[in-house]
Amino acid sequence: MKTTRTVLPAVAMTAVSMVLTLAVVVMWLGTAVPWPVALVVGLGIDGGWLATLAYERRLAAQGDHSNAVTAVGWSFGLLAAGVLVAHALTADRSAGAWLAVAWLPLAAKALWLVHGMWERTALTPSALGAIRGIQQEARDEAAVARARLRAEAATEETRLTAVTQAGARVARVQARTADTLAGAWSTLEKARAGEDTGRALTSVTARVTPDVAPRWELPVWGPTEQVPALDAGPALTDAELDVLVDSIRNSQTPALSYREMAVRFRAAGHSASEVRLRAAWKRVA
């Protein structure tokens, strides 16, 4: 049993201490009194020690404790240690050896104290099994929590990496698109600023608008404004269109641009094709 781990050393040291005490008492008092008397004195010291020790063990088995019995037990232990020390100091030979074993009675009492503490704190196998189960459950939960945290961290890292890569791809596509649009609008601007652009477009559309010779311009890259839907109305003649365009253009100082004039023209409910409206603008401007 596990209790033997503490009780056997205490029993062994107590037995050795009692034998040494009895031997010292007999040798020490044997020269002064008859040896039976010395033997009785030594057995009295050992017997008192054993009696108090047995009583302490009985109280401990009942879950009780007595300070008086404990004090008496320690008194017998101190008495035995004192006998050994006194013998060592008065011995002619081997004084050091006797001093080396003089502490054994006190050590025996200390071992019995340790054994009592062991018994008071000892648990049954079922309780120990329950404690081990609780500790193992706590370790399992901690391991699962650590694994979950590591998995969530790895998932978040993967997600952030994917988002970063996708953002980088989108940025590269947007940069390429911006370069392409810039090149396209640069080419358009060069064509718009060219001297032969208007004549080329006019020659293409001369058959469609035989009576109008506008100065063609390519669209300008810029913000657009939404215009309201137009209701179908009577077509305006060129003279009426010129009057409306001129009045709208000069309704504000400085005069409105073509874009502003066209927005106000259609917002007023008038309708005209882009070709006729631009031609009227050119005539009045």
Image: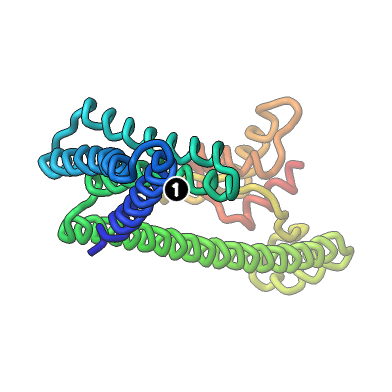
Does any portion of residue 105 appear in the rendered image?
yes
Mark 1, other Cα within 10 Å: few <14 / some 14–19 / many ≥20: few
Which percent across, then down, holds residue 93? 60, 48
Picture colour scheme: rainbow
The total number of labels drawn is 1
Q: Is residue 112 above or below residue 12?
A: above
Q: Residue at x 20, y 52 (%)?
A: 123
SS type, badge 1:
loop
Relative placement, left or right, of 232 versus 280 is left
Which percent across, then down, holds residue 46? 28, 43
Which percent across, then down, holds residue 266? 53, 43
Residue 5 occupies which quadrant of the picture?
A: bottom left
Which percent across, then down, holds residue 81? 42, 38
Looking at this rendering, what residue extends furthest in the right direction?
195
**Badge 1 amino acid:** Leu
Q: Residue at x 81, y 60 (%)?
A: 189
Q: Nearer the viewer, residue 170 or 277?
A: 170
Query: Where does label 1 land, which residue?
Result: 230
Q: Is residue 145 above or below residue 199?
A: above
Residue 252 occupies which quadrant of the picture?
A: top right
Q: Residue at x 64, y 70 (%)?
A: 208
